[in-house]
Amino acid sequence: MTNSFKAAIDKYVFKKDDILVFDRGMQSRRSFAEIDDKAIKFITRLTSQASLKVIRKLDIPQEKSGSLRIISDFIALPSTSSRSKYKNEFRVIEAKNEQDGLLVFLTNCFHLTADEICRTYKQRWGIEIFFKFLKSYLNGRHFLSRNKTGIINAYYLRLIAAILVAVVMHTNKSKSFKLAKITLQNLLTHFCLVVLQYQKSSPRAPPVQRTKSPI
């Protein structure tokens, strides 16, 4: 577990129904055990070559989970070695689709169905795509400030811009983000010009006369 990831977990106060979802960047059995020992529910993906010791098999649902076809659902130890000191039991779900082939999910969420686990992990992609959208289309790769407050404010502005672009796309029934972005830029430019023109044409208020206090 990387120091930054561990610090984020230690800092966050997990509620009863919270589920931690992360990608295949972390494959350490020790990290899985540490998270499980803290009673934190999580869902992640394993590589297809991961060695697992099957303890018992579970029933496989007949229906598909979206585009995924679930082929196995079982309880396992995350290591086949008898010398491994990590004895935490996890649930493993193997599924296939035409695009990605075999997908292996590891979780300690024994109360969820296989379909719910697959769909919960899939929601993570929405976050990934949104941050890619911020970085690629709204200049999120460049920081206007290096302090925490400046970075937070900059991302609030980008979020507002993203909402405005989405409104333009919905209003114009457009599927092109680039076209909606250009349309929004033109609207904001026109709005600024109108405001400046109004300020120039409107009569200015008389200056406030300041009087000295008698005290």
Image (spheres, helix red, strand yellow):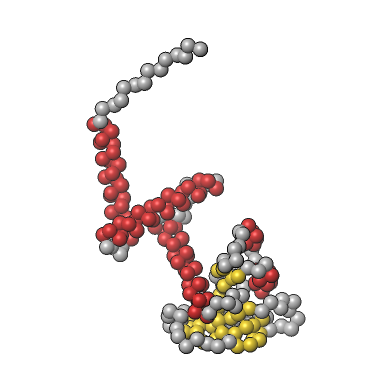
**Looking at the image, residue 199 lies above or below residue 142:** above
* Residue 202, position as x, y percentages in the image: 25, 30
- What residue is rendered at 50% in x and 76% in y? 116
Picture residue at 42% right of the left edge, 54% below the top: 159
The quarter in which the N terminus is drawn is bottom right
Name the residue furthest left: 201
- Horizontally, is 35 left or right of 199 in the view? right
**60 or 168, nearer to the observer:** 60
Residue 59, x across and y down, in percent: 55, 88
Residue 50's spot in the image, x, y percent? 61, 80
Q: Could you tell me residue 148's position as x and y percent?
A: 55, 48
Viewer can see residue 124: yes
What residue do we see at 48% from left, 74% from top? 119
Tell me if residue 179 can be seen: no
**Above or below 109: residue 188:** above
Image position of 152 with respect to 122: above or below: above
Which residue is situated farthest in the top direction here? Answer: 214
Q: How many marks?
A: 0
Which is more toward the observer, 160 or 141?
160
Specify whether 161 is left or right of 11: left
Q: Please name the residue shown 69% across and 77% down the image.
A: 88
